[in-house]
Image (cartoon, helix red, strand yellow):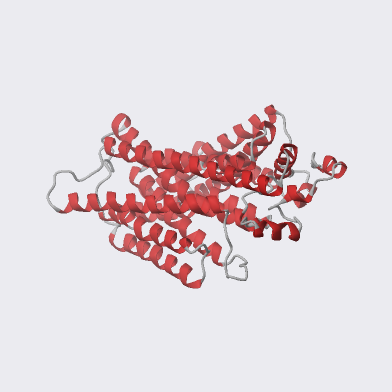
Amino acid sequence: MKHTNPHSQSERRKSVRPEVTAGLPGAPSALHKYLRKTGIDPDRLSILHLGRPAYLHKYDIPPWVVRMAVGYLLWIALFLLDVYPIGLPHYLEAIFSLVTGLIIIQVACQVLVTATERFAARMGWTHYVAGTVSEILSTLPELVVIGFLVPVSPLTAFIVAMITIYNNALVFSIYSYFLPKDYKGKYLMPKPITDAGTQVLIAGGALGMVIGIVMLILSSNGHPKKAFDAIDLGGITFLLLAIFVAYLYKLLRDLGKEEDDVQATLKLTEDEMIERQQLAFKNVERSSLGQIMLLLAIGVLSAFLGGESIADFASLSIQDMGLSGIVAAMILAGFAGMSEYVILWTSHRKKEYGIALANAFGGIAQLMFLIVPFTFLAIAYYQAFVNPTHPELPILFSLPNILLLIFLFPTLHTLASLLENDHTMDILDTTIMVTLVGLLLILLVVYGTAPE
């Protein structure tokens, strides 16, 4: 039996005032003109349609189920290769592990987002809370990958987390350049996301510069401290997470105020605000709590299986194939942002370009203030309590590590400065960002492959 949207019948029975749809696709242009006159840009409102697009409802089975089956079959094949050694070349086994991990992690991300949206619809969350929680939960596969990488190579885990920040900044810059622009050459994100995001970009760049300069000074003047102790990493983790908590508070507060302003401007009643909220979840399938928990379990299991496969790739590439930690980390970092890219593509496919752009932008902040501190904390724990004698511990104040931190300032500061003009990237902006990130990667490959 084909899936039918549970809201479709009720929506046909009940007429909705046009004002309730403000900011959503298909809202009357006259309504949007009125909002602009009152100072509210309807194109920048954060409201969106969560869930599967309507045109995908014709499929009996969600597309991710097929990908999940393929990923699990590949994982079983890898497991059998370990049980019954066939003697594949190391490079084939490494590629096999990487492909398997990426497929399963992509599925894990989509399943976790789906479970969050269905739970939010069931609990009556606002759409912006649901979107924020979905974006955070979608980082679970990345956290699991880092958790598996740390015992194999703490340095690789550190470098993967850092390089992925630059990759996401690059993805944001390139994607925003190709978006359809308005008559002023702009494609604007929701203002609360722009405001809070710009602030955390500045904070991330400043912290990276301060830590990098301290590392540079200590490593060059004969000071006995040449590496991060576990307590150092713990302290940095606390600072980053404190900023992340404040960022979430400001983001949710501003998004809530945005909806309050719409309600006051359009004189929406409480019932109409509830109906407006339901419109945001119209594509979300209503599920029982048991079904949601099953999806959550599948997502968590997939995250662990995918993370294990990617850790196997790291182990094979570094220990058996002889790749340097820098090169292996760059390969992994190229795929580590898979969860953000899945959300970006899903939103783009629904033609919700502003939401896709906001997710690409939010991915930078989450990496800097959630994934990176988790990585530091995992390394600190492993260093203090599990294996302090690991050959890559402690994390040295080496040239590649210093470059990765110091380059945060020009990269994130430039991105924040370009966004201060309230626009997305044109050809010059994108070229600047590509040049900055490209320069860092060249310096890492040329000067960072030999351990100090």
Work out which quarter of the rendered image holds the N terminus and state it: top right
Residue drawn at (73%, 50%), measured in percent from left and top? 21
Residue drawn at (72%, 29%), measured in percent from left and top? 288
Say whether residue 337 is visible.
Answer: no
Nearest the camera: 301 or 90? 301
The single residue placed furthest to the top in the displayed view is 290
Residue 354, compared with residue 320, is above or below; it is below
Q: Residue 18 placed where, x, y %?
A: 78, 51
Nearest the camera: 16 or 336? 16
Residue 213, compared with residue 431, is above or below; it is above
Residue drawn at (27%, 39%), measured in percent from left and top? 232
Q: Is residue 160 left or right of residue 339?
A: left
Q: Is residue 348 left or right of residue 383?
A: right
The single residue placed furthest to the right in the displayed view is 13
The mark total stands at 0
Residue 290, compared with residue 336, is above or below; it is above
Q: Residue 88 placed where, x, y %?
A: 48, 49
Query: Could you say which quadrant of the image residue 238 lies in?
Result: top left
Residue drawn at (75%, 55%), measured in percent from left and top? 27
